[in-house]
Image (cartoon, grey):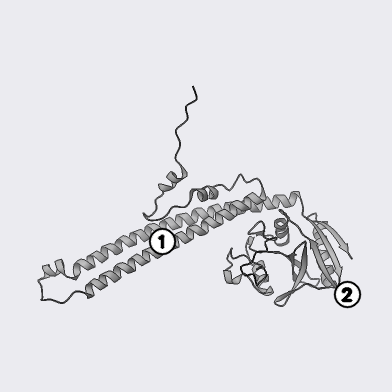
C-alpha cells in the first residue's frame, strides 16, 4: 500500500487572501512575496543582486498599486459630490413645504447620502493608509536586509580575492597619452566599484550594460533609480561628480567606474573607466565634460594610485606600455 499523502497546506494565494486589505485592492503576486522574504540563502553575489533587484521592482509595483487606489478613491469622491450637486441643481423650486416634508423630499436626504458616502470613503482611506504604511515598513526592512547581504558578500569577496587589472599605456606624444584597462567581467566590476568608492552598484551587470533609451544617444551614465529621476540620467561631469560623491551606500552608475585620485597639493581629480568594447578607457573630468587624452602627469598619477592599491594588497595590477 502506498503511503498516504499529507493534506496540502495553504497556498501562497490563500495566505495572501487573508490579508486585511481594502475590499477592492488587488493582491501582490505570491512570487514577489516569496522573493522579498528571503534575504539569506543566496550563494553567489549575482544571486544576491537578482533577489535585490526583484525586491526593488516589487516595491515599486506596490507603490504604484497604492497610488492607483488613492486615485480611484479620489475619483469616486469627486463623482459623488458632482452627482449630489447635479441632483440639487436639477430640482425645480415648488411651493413651500412643511419642515417634515422638506426633510423627506428636499435637499436633506441628498446631504445625508453625501455625508454617509464621505464617511465611508474616509474610513476606506484610513484603512488604505494603514496598509500602505505597513507594506512600506515590510518592504524597507526586506530591501535593507538584501542590500546588507550584497554589501557583506562584496566585502568578503574583495578580501578573499582582490580584483586583477591590466593597465595599458598608449603614447600619443611626448607629453600626452591614452590609458586603457583591459575589460573585466563577472563580479570584478562590483568589487572595483566598492574598492574605488566604498559603495555598491545598484546592479550587478552595470559596467557592461550598453542599453540606451534613445538610439541617437550613447548609453546614459546613470540608471533612473536610487533617487535619480529619468531626466537626470545624463548629467554633466560636475553633476555626475556630485552624484557619485553624495552620501549613500548604493550608486546607480552605468557603463563606467569612477576613480578619485589625490593631488599632491591636496584635493583630488575625478577619473572614470569608461567601457569601450574590449577595453575601458581612462578619462578625466574637465569642467563639464570628460577628456580621454591625458597629460603625462595625469597618467602617472592615475597609474600611481592603482599601484598604491596593489601595495596594500587590495588589487592585482599589471602595467604595460608601448
Q: Residue at x 41, y 47 (%)?
A: 17
Q: Quadrant of the C terminus?
A: bottom right
- Packing grade of label 1 (10 A; few <14, some 14-19, many >=20) is some
Residue 162 on image: x %, y %: 77, 53
At a point 22% along the width and 73% down the height, the residue shown is 88
The residue at which mark 1 appears reads as: 69
Tell me the element at label 1.
Answer: helix
Q: In the displayed structure, would residue 190 be above or below residue 176? A: above
How far separated are the C-alphas under marks 2 and 1? 64 Å
Q: Quadrant of residue 41?
A: top right
* Camera-nearest residue between 168 and 4: 4
Report helix, strand or loop for mark 2. Answer: loop
Q: Is residue 62 left or right of residue 189?
A: left
Residue drawn at 70 percent across, 57 percent down: 190
Question: Is the residue 18 above or below the residue 265 in the image?
Answer: above
Going from N to C along the chain, the mark reached first, 2 or 1, is: 1
Q: Is residue 117 left or right of residue 255?
A: left
Residue hosting label 2: 173
What is the quadrant of residue 143 in the picture? bottom right
Q: Position of residue 237 (x, y in %)?
A: 69, 73
Q: Residue at x 52, y 59 (%)?
A: 60
- Residue 89 lies left or right of residue 122; in this view the side is left
Amino acid at each position: 500500500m502506498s503511503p498516504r499523502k499529507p493534506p496540502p497546506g495553504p497556498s501562497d494565494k490563500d495566505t495572501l487572501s487573508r490579508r486585511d486589505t481594502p475590499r477592492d485592492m488587488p493582491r501582490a503576486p505570491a512570487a514577489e512575496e516569496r522573493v522579498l522574504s528571503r534575504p539569506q540563502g543566496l550563494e553567489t553575489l549575482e544571486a544576491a543582486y537578482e533577489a535585490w533587484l526583484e525586491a526593488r521592482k516589487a516595491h515599486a509595483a506596490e507603490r504604484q498599486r497604492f497610488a492607483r487606489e488613492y486615485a480611484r478613491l479620489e475619483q469616486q469622491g469627486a463623482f459623488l459630490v458632482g452627482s449630489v450637486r447635479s441632483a440639487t441643481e436639477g430640482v425645480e423650486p415648488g411651493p413651500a413645504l412643511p419642515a417634515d416634508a422638506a426633510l423627506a423630499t428636499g435637499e436633506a436626504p441628498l446631504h445625508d447620502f453625501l455625508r454617509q458616502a464621505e464617511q465611508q470613503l474616509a474610513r476606506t482611506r484610513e484603512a488604505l493608509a494603514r496598509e500602505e504604511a505597513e507594506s512600506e515598513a515590510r518592504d524597507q526592512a526586506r530591501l535593507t536586509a538584501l542590500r546588507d547581504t550584497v554589501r557583506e558578500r562584496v566585502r568578503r569577496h574583495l578580501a578573499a580575492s582582490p580584483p586583477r587589472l591590466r593597465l595599458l599605456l598608449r603614447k600619443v606624444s611626448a607629453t600626452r597619452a591614452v590609458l586603457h584597462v583591459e575589460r573585466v567581467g563577472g563580479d570584478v566590476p562590483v568589487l572595483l566599484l566598492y574598492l574605488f568608492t566604498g559603495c555598491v552598484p545598484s546592479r550587478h551587470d552595470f559596467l557592461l550594460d550598453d542599453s540606451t533609451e534613445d538610439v541617437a544617444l550613447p548609453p546614459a551614465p546613470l540608471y533612473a533609480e536610487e533617487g535619480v529621476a529619468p531626466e537626470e540620467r545624463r548629467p554633466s561631469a560636475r553633476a555626475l561628480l556630485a552624484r557619485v560623491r553624495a552620501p549613500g551606500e548604493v550608486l546607480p552608475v552605468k557603463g563606467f567606474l569612477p576613480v578619485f585620485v589625490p593631488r599632491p597639493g591636496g584635493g583630488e581629480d575625478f577619473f572614470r573607466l569608461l567601457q569601450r568594447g574590449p577595453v575601458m578607457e581612462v578619462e578625466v573630468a574637465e569642467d563639464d565634460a570628460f577628456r580621454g587624452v591625458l597629460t603625462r602627469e595625469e597618467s602617472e598619477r592615475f597609474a600611481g594610485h592603482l599601484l598604491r592599491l596593489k601595495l596594500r594588497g587590495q588589487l592585482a595590477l599589471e602595467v604595460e606600455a608601448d
